[in-house]
Amino acid sequence: ETIELHFSLGNLFRRRGETERAIRVHQHLAIRDDLKPRDRDHAAYELGRDFLRAGLLDRAEASLNRVGDGKYAAPAKESLLEMYQVERDWKKAIIAAAELEGLQGKSHQTEIAQFHCELAQEALRRHDLVDAEQSIERALQAVPNHARALILQGDYLVASDRPGQAIAVWSVVADTHP
């Protein structure tokens, strides 16, 4: 009967910087079996936000992943996506963006292409040309003629001792994305 009061109290604690108290309030709500699934999802979402605020990223991820398919699913995935970007965990960011696309019905292909480009850049730094090529192809599948992916494709071609092809790819970039 006091669920809304608990949520308000937890949010007040979080805003005042009393993250530990906010976590305790939201944990109490998240573990209660007598709550409706919507309220448990809300508690898991708020608990995830508390953990993010406290810098406990592994716990935040676990809590946000517990959120179901209801009203809080999209905000939870958005929080996860932001967290994965901060952590530079591009593979998980790709998965979260794809799931968010399904929840929101709007395209996140540009972000997905950027995440694949990050993976390609890391692979090029490691001199893992196979992984770099795959990541570049995935980026170009997400967004054809993506400027950054084309530039990285040129870098990949140079690393593969194919400078003529690299110049051709970079010329496409110059023509399509001046």
Image (cartoon, helix red, strand yellow):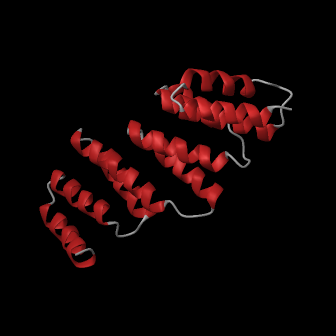
- Of 49 and 3, nearer the camera is 3
Question: In the figure, 161 relative to 58: above or below?
Answer: below
Q: In the rendered view, does 112 fall on the left or right side of 117? A: right
Work out which quarter of the rendered image holds the N terminus and state it.
Answer: top right
Question: In the figure, 134 relative to 4: above or below?
Answer: below
**What residue sits 33% from the left and 48% below the top?**
118
Work out which quarter of the rendered image holds the C terminus and state it.
Answer: bottom left
Residue 18: give x, y in percent of width and height: 54, 25
**What residue sits 43% from the left and 63% below the top?**
141
**What residue sits 22% from the left and 68% below the top?**
169
List the single residue furthest toward the bottom: 175
Q: Is residue 50 visible?
A: yes
**What residue sits 27% from the left and 41% below the top?**
128
Q: Quadrant of residue 155?
A: bottom left
Q: Is residue 61 visible?
A: no
- Of 41 and 122, nearer the camera is 41
- Of 75 and 120, nearer the camera is 75
Q: In the rendered view, does 113 fall on the left or right side of 17? A: left
Q: In the rendered view, does 139 fall on the left or right side of 164? A: right
Question: In the figure, 125 relative to 175: above or below?
Answer: above
Count of numbered tags = 0
Residue 89: give x, y in percent of width and height: 42, 38
Question: In the figure, 4 relative to 142: above or below?
Answer: above
Residue 23: give x, y in percent of width and height: 61, 24
Residue 83: give x, y in percent of width and height: 47, 39
